[in-house]
Amino acid sequence: MSGTTDKVKGRIKEAAGALTDNNELREEGKTDQAVGKAKQLASAQKAVDEAKDSTKSCG
């Protein structure tokens, strides 16, 4: 699952937890959002590393 998907799923869970007064579901939503953000950051870091590697081979 992509980071964006995890973040959206987390927002939905958090909202559903808030509406139903379900703290466990709300916390699951927050966790899913954090996982999504971590995936996005890891993906961005990988792209930066690949760009650095490609410029090294050009020079």
Image (cartoon, rainbow, N blue to C red):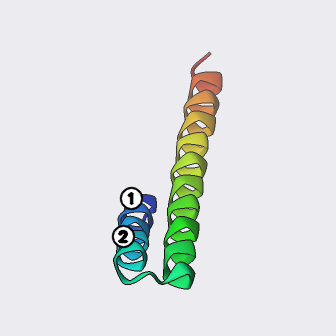
The image quarter in which residue 38 lies: bottom right
Q: How crowded is mark 2: few (under 14 residues within 10 Å), some or many (20 or more)?
A: some
Residue type (three-letter) at the residue carrying disc 2: Ala
Q: How far apart are marks 2 and 1 (CA)?
A: 17 Å
Q: Which of marks 2 and 1 is nearer the N terminus?
A: 1
Amino acid type shown at disc 1: Thr
Left or right, 29 with reference to 4: right
Q: Nearer the viewer, residue 22 or 5?
A: 22
| Residue under pointer 2 | 15
Residue name at image x 56 percent, y 83 percent:
24
**Which element is circle 1 on?**
helix
Q: Which residue lies furthest to the front in this view?
A: 21
Residue 36, image x, y percentages:
50, 61
> In x, y percent, where is residue 26?
50, 74
* Along the line of sight, the residue nearer the viewer: 26 or 36: 26
Is residue 21 positioned above or below 44 on the image?
below
Which disc, if any, is residue 4?
Answer: 1
Residue 31 vs residue 10: left or right? right
Q: Which mark is residue 16?
A: none
Q: Is mark 2 on a helix, strand or loop?
A: helix
From what the image shows, is residue 34 above or below residue 40? below
5 is higher (above) or lower (below) than 16: above
Question: Which quadrant would residue 45 be assigned to in this image?
Answer: top right
Picture layout, residue 34 above or below residue 43:
below
Question: What is the crowding at mark 1: few (fewer than 14 residues within 10 Å), some, or many (at least 20)?
Answer: some
Let me know if residue 1 appears in the view: no
Q: Where is residue 52 in the image (x, y as percent from the top left)?
A: 62, 28
